[in-house]
Image: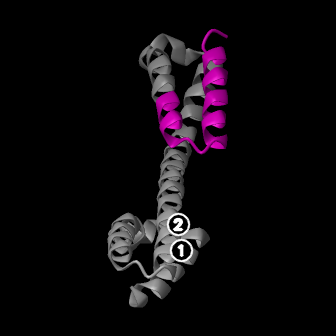
């Protein structure tokens, strides 16, 4: 039918966004899907068709899943980016400590504390489930008393 094709196309885009862990893309595709489905949802005449009923039900069932996957993908991406940044600063800090560069150590420690706030501040519970975050926090806590 006329409405089935866009649904399949957008479902494929959602799957692609999920594979790439791209929550923003998933949300964008979901919004596009919503716009395309609204005329069907809002036109009572279409509701007599079984395929329209099925499609609307599928979309209704899919929404919470897509929203939570998009949210998880966004959190995951944030976590990976923040972790990469923290690990890089940590390496620089370890080099500075080896060379006993006092000023550099203080500057890098401050930079690391700010970068690590995503894992130690208000959102820490969101990231606590990630093993990589736990490993980083262990290194972070080990180095803290020595700075």
- Looking at the picture, the colour scheme in use is one colour
Identify residue for label 2. 87
Where does the magenta region start and end?
A: 1-30
Say which residue appears at 49% left-offset and 44% top-offset: 67
Q: Which quadrant would residue 50 be assigned to in this image?
A: top right
Q: Is residue 46 above or below residue 81?
A: above
Q: Position of residue 116 (x, y in %)?
A: 40, 68
Q: Is residue 78 above or below residue 50?
A: below
Count of numbered labels shown in the rendering: 2
Is there CB contact under 8 Å for labels 2 and 1?
yes
User: Which one is in front, 70 or 146?
Assistant: 146
User: Which one is in front, 4 or 66?
Assistant: 66
Label 2: which secondary element:
helix
Give the main secondary structure of the magenta stretch: helix
What crowding class fits label 1: few (fewer than 14 Cα within 10 Å), some (14-19), or many (20 or more)? some
Q: Is residue 87 above or below residue 71?
A: below
Quick one: quadrant of the C terminus? bottom left
Image disc number at residue 136: 1
Quick check: is 104 in the magenta stretch?
Answer: no
């Amino acid at each position: 039918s006329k409405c089935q094709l866009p649904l399949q196309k957008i479902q494929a885009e959602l799957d692609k966004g999920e594979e790439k862990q791209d929550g923003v893309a998933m949300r964008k595709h979901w919004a596009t899907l919503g716009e395309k489905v609204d005329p069907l949802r809002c036109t009572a005449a279409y509701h007599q068709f079984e395929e329209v009923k099925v499609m609307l039900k599928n979309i209704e069932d899919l929404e919470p899943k897509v929203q939570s996957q998009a949210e998880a993908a966004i959190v995951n991406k944030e976590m990976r980016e923040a972790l990469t940044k923290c690990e890089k600063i940590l390496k620089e800090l370890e080099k500075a400590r080896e060379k006993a560069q006092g000023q550099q150590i203080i500057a890098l420690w401050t930079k690391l504390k700010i970068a690590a706030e995503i894992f130690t501040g208000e959102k820490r519970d969101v990231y606590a489930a990630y093993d990589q975050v736990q490993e980083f926090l262990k290194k972070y806590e080990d180095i803290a008393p020595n700075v």
